[in-house]
Image (cartoon, grey):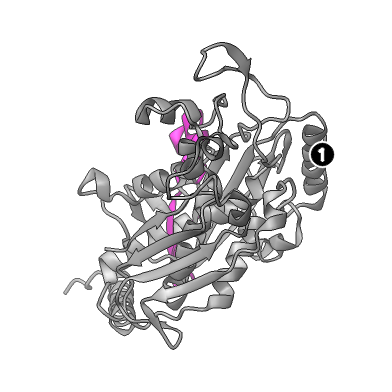
Amino acid sequence: MLRFLTAGESHGPALTVVVDGLPAGVVVDRAAIDSDLRRRQGGYGRGGRMKIETDAVEILSGVRHGRTLGSPVTLVVRNRDHENWKDVMSPDPQPPEARRRRALKHPRPGHADLAGALKFLTDDLRNVLERASARETTSRVAAGALARGLLAAAGVEVRSHVVRIGEAVLPAGIDVPWEALAAVEESPVRCVDGTVAAAMIAAIDRAKKDGNTLGGVFEVVVRGLPPGLGSFAQWDRRLDGRLGQAFLSIQAVKAVALGAGFEGGWTPGASFHDEILFSDERGLHRGSNRAGGLEGGVSNGEELRARAVVKPIPTLLMPLRSINMRTKEPENASVERSDTCVVPAAGVVGEAMACLVLADALLEKFGGDSLDETLAHLKATREQWKKFLSRRPREEA
């Protein structure tokens, strides 16, 4: 089982993640991890925090000479902004004036502030927001980069792009080709269409001017995923369910669609499902991919496609109505330093979560203690698929 656990607060000294279950021999490229961390920090519409932080990973355990050892891998990313918050975030007892400094008393609608206050019975909302903050996704992206290394060794590639920001959206019903996704990082909003990207940027500018925020939709695309990952035998082993939970765990994600999932609610079955075809030239293939590479909770060998809806960030420069948690009197919600739009960055986090879930599913089916064992098992299984699909009915005597 591949599993990971993150720790750390938004303005604490560091963010930490422990990844357990990686086989020995997986290449760990520190520069590639840092590259993914930079992508998470980027994207048009980010706020002032990203001008302070320059995320870079430190490897504390589980890696020697650029490869995993098979033991838990520990990664750390330091928070540079912690220097400005040492007394506020100190683990040691502090005088009353330090405890009051930067205290938050007015919960933001749409944030974890109020729900967390009720859960932990605290009127100091900083105790909630520091961990609920999307800064935590830095750890996930670092962990996802490790999982990406395992998938790459198995011939699996993972990319993402932005489908929508506000009212600016790519044309409906068209799957962006894999090849077009290679250049997506050249766009400030990570959108493949220049005209739509310009509309997205303009929409973000308008929202920022108005003190507002914008959400949108990103898509994660996976190529080279072998069939047979996941299972329909038990509910919690279904790969679609595991991916759905992973995406919905990302801060601000409110809905997930696999393939053309939402369209399935209003499209007749004869027009929705992907017909199964076979030819000597192409082998087993489909005429379409509305299933998004998943059927019955199991990967079917087609490209995996999943979209996630990202809500607008709840911290507004023109705040909504709220209350003072101590007096219960009406007041505007608190205003923290925040972003106007995080959809481009959320796509990078989506990639990381997909990598972690799919690497776990890959090891579940083909795993071994070393990468060589895993790849040998995958290779042998591919040979079995070829034999299975090449069978022909015996000629009658």
Q: Is residue 378 above or below residue 239?
A: below
Q: Quadrant of the C terminus?
A: bottom left
Q: Nearer the viewer, residue 318 or 275?
A: 318
The x and y percentages for residue 293 are 44, 54
Q: Is residue 210 above or below residue 331?
A: below
At label 1, the amino acid type is Asp
Q: Secondary structure at mark 1?
A: helix
Report the residue that reaches farthest toward the left: 397
Picture residue at 36% right of the left edge, 29% below the top? 119
From this view, report whether residue 235 is shown above or below residue 119: below
Outermost residue toward the front in this view? 95
Residue furthest out toward the bottom: 65
Q: Position of residue 309 (x, y in %)?
A: 56, 38
Q: Residue furthest top?
A: 329
Count of all numbered marks drawn on residues in the image: 1
Image side of residue 41 versus residue 389, left or right: right
Task: Decide if residue 91 is in sight here.
Answer: yes
How dense is the environment of label 1, judged by Cα within 10 Å: few (below 14), some, or many (20 and up)?
some
Residue at horizontal 73 percent and vertical 25 percent from the top:
318
Q: Which residue is mark 1?
A: 205
Quadrant containing the N terminus in the rendered view: bottom left
Q: Is residue 296 left or right of residue 146?
A: left
Query: Residue 210 location in percent, x, y?
Result: 80, 28
What span is colored magenta in the figure?
Answer: 259-288
Q: In this orientation, which residue lies closer to the viewer: 285 or 289?
A: 289
Residue 26: say if magenta. Answer: no
12 or 40, nearer to the observer: 12
Q: Is residue 63 left or right of residue 221?
A: left
Image point (46%, 46%), residue name: 247
Q: Is residue 255 visible?
A: no
Estimate the x, y position of residue 392 in percent, counting from the top left. 28, 71
Residue occupying image coordinates x 81% and y 52%: 194
